[in-house]
Image: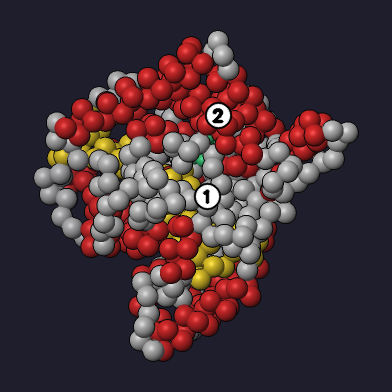
């Protein structure tokens, strides 16, 4: 039998329907791949018993010709999604014994469509990070290595475990969340596809909140088609999240192969930043050429407020985080460190429960929201956010369908390389992705090539609100031209 773990989701779906193997066999193949790949530290919880039980039920459905869209497909879930009866830690010590009594809407949608949970993936603590080094469970190691070197590289973050799992063929698909780039950046670093939907496309209910006005769930997969299949199940209105939008969910898979002729693609000149490696420039130009060859029109555009996006993000996101994280007080969830009185208990619990990066964000957030600084920082950042959004709107109104940019300013870096010094070094990784969250737009990262060290690089497409379909059509054009990339197995 061929290696079941290297099949794409669409291939596995077809083979299951043809009874070439069973969902239990498919789950077992992935579960043993996960066992062999523990060196990557991609999973914080493995759920073999649950996976086999869900797969068995899927086989019954398939046998009765009652298969649902994701029947029997193994899915890895970022440990930020609450899963009923399965520990959910958000990568934090403060939640490391938390077993949610409820299921997030996005994961519930996946199980409703027949998917099989194989485990929960590691992530930066409370999704704060770009390298997966802030997790209480330790860093995730990328399945990729520089050619001829065995230095450990980061998979990107914060959804690094999900990205590493999909890139290393431990799951054909996974969920992630993206507040400032946490799906697209790790997708780019690991050579896979990752999509952040329009704000409101997926319900945030049951996802551990980081910055509520920026957070969105989205899929990781090894092909654009697979990402489209997953989004169709994940998306949808949810009465439990008032920011989820009542809008029919298109059959996203239909967008694969659709013509992109006459689409106008903007190349924002402000994304050509100082010090950007020449190979990223070259890759970006290739991407434009590929879209042009498919009939799209390439236009240089301007998004003048781009340079303010990162500083404004690092006010808005910590502000919301400091408020969201106030609930971890040792009373209602997870860790409690006793103290002489309730105040001391709060202090001890939060000091012991939160890691350094989370504490930094809480302090920044509390500061920018405090009386006297609120207007100078928070209110100003909100105004800048409006300007960033308007930049995109102006372009979309003038007939631009999507933007093409690099996903990241560099390829993956080494573990420890950017986590010990100035935190801004790490924050700079998100310069091309945070704008999209600030504007609430959809964005996809598609693998587009390898750098001179043999590491994957991604291109980002940014779309109009709720036009994920165009991103899938355009992304598919890039994928066809660039090919697919997989790491050489060393683990
Ligand atoms: N890296 C960014 C941050 O640390 C974005 C994280 C995310 O998208 N969750 O805030």
Q: Is mark 1 within 8 Å of ligand 1?
A: no
In this orientation, which residue lies closer to the viewer: 399 or 418?
399
* Above or below for 293 versus 423: below
Q: Which residue is pictured at 27% across the width and 41% down the height?
A: 465
Q: Position of residue 258 (x, y in %)?
A: 18, 58
- Residue 67: assigned label: none
- Label 2: element kind: helix
Q: Position of residue 311 (x, y in %)?
A: 47, 22
Q: Quadrant of the C terminus?
A: bottom right
Residue 153 shows in this picture = no
Location of residue 305 by image quarter: top left
Taking the image as shown, residue 120 lies to the left or right of residue 330, namely: left
- Residue 318: assigned label: 2
Which residue is the site of mark 1?
207
* Above or below for 116 versus 401: below
Location of residue 277 by image quarter: top left
Q: Position of residue 364 (x, y in %)?
A: 60, 23
Q: Position of residue 30 (x, y in %)?
A: 55, 71
Taking the image as shown, residue 204 lies to the left or right of residue 260, namely: right
In this orientation, which residue lies closer to the viewer: 421 or 234?
234
Q: Which residue is pictured at 34% across the width and 33% down the height?
A: 439
Q: Residues within 10 Å of mark 1 (few under 14, many from 20)?
A: many
Tell me if label 2 and label 1 are in contact, CB under 8 Å.
no
Name the colouring of the figure: secondary structure
Residue 115 shows in this picture = yes
Q: Is mark 2 within 8 Å of ligand 1?
A: no
In this orientation, which residue lies closer to the viewer: 338 or 306?
338
Q: Which residue is pictured at 54% across the width and 27% down the height?
A: 319
* Above or below for 18 versus 211: below
* Above or below for 431 versus 294: above
Taking the image as shown, residue 110 lies to the left or right of residue 209, namely: left
């Amino acid at each position: 039998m061929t290696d079941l773990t290297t099949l794409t989701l669409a291939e596995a779906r077809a083979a299951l329907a043809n009874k070439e193997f069973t969902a239990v066999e498919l789950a077992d193949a992935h579960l043993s791949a996960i066992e062999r790949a523990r060196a990557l530290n991609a999973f914080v919880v493995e759920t073999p018993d649950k996976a086999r039980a869900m797969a068995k039920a899927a086989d019954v459905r398939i046998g009765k010709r009652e298969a649902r869209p994701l029947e029997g497909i193994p899915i890895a879930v970022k440990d930020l999604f609450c899963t009923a009866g399965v520990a959910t830690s958000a990568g934090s010590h403060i939640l490391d014994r938390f077993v949610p009594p409820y299921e997030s809407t996005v994961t519930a949608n996946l199980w409703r469509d027949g998917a099989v949970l194989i485990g929960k993936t590691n992530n930066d603590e409370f999704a704060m990070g770009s390298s997966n080094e802030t997790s209480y469970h330790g860093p995730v190691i990328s399945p990729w290595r520089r050619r001829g070197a065995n230095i450990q590289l980061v998979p990107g973050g914060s959804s690094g475990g999900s990205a590493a799992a999909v890139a290393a063929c431990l799951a054909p698909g996974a969920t992630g969340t993206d507040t400032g780039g946490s799906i697209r950046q790790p997708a780019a670093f690991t050579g896979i596809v990752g999509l952040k939907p329009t704000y409101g496309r997926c319900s945030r209910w049951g996802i551990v909140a980081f910055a509520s006005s920026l957070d969105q769930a989205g899929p990781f997969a090894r092909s654009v088609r697979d990402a489209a299949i997953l989004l169709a199940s994940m998306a949808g209105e949810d009465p439990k999240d008032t920011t989820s939008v009542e809008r029919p969910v298109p059959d996203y898979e239909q967008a694969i192969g659709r013509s992109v002729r006459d689409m106008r693609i903007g190349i924002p000149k402000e994304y050509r930043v100082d010090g950007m490696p020449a190979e990223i420039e070259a890759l970006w130009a290739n991407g434009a050429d590929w879209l042009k060859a498919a009939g799209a029109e390439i236009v240089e555009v301007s998004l003048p407020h781009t340079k303010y996006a990162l500083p404004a993000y690092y006010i808005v996101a910590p502000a919301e985080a400091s408020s969201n994280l106030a609930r971890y007080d040792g009373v209602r969830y997870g860790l409690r460190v006793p103290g002489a009185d309730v105040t001391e208990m709060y202090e001890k619990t939060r000091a012991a429960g939160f890691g350094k990066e989370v504490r930094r964000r809480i302090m920044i957030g509390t500061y920018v929201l405090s009386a006297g600084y609120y207007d100078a920082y928070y209110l100003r950042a909100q105004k800048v956010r409006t300007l960033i959004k308007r930049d995109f709107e102006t372009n979309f109104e003038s007939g631009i369908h999507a933007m093409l940019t690099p996903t990241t300013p560099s390829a993956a870096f080494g573990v420890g390389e950017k986590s010990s010094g100035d935190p801004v070094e790490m924050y700079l990784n998100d310069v091309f992705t945070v704008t999209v969250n600030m504007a609430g737009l959809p964005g996809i990262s598609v693998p587009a090539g390898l750098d001179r060290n043999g590491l994957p690089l991604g291109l980002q497409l940014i779309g109009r609100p709720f036009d994920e379909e165009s991103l899938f059509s355009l992304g598919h054009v890039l994928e066809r031209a660039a090919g697919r990339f997989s790491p050489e197995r060393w683990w």
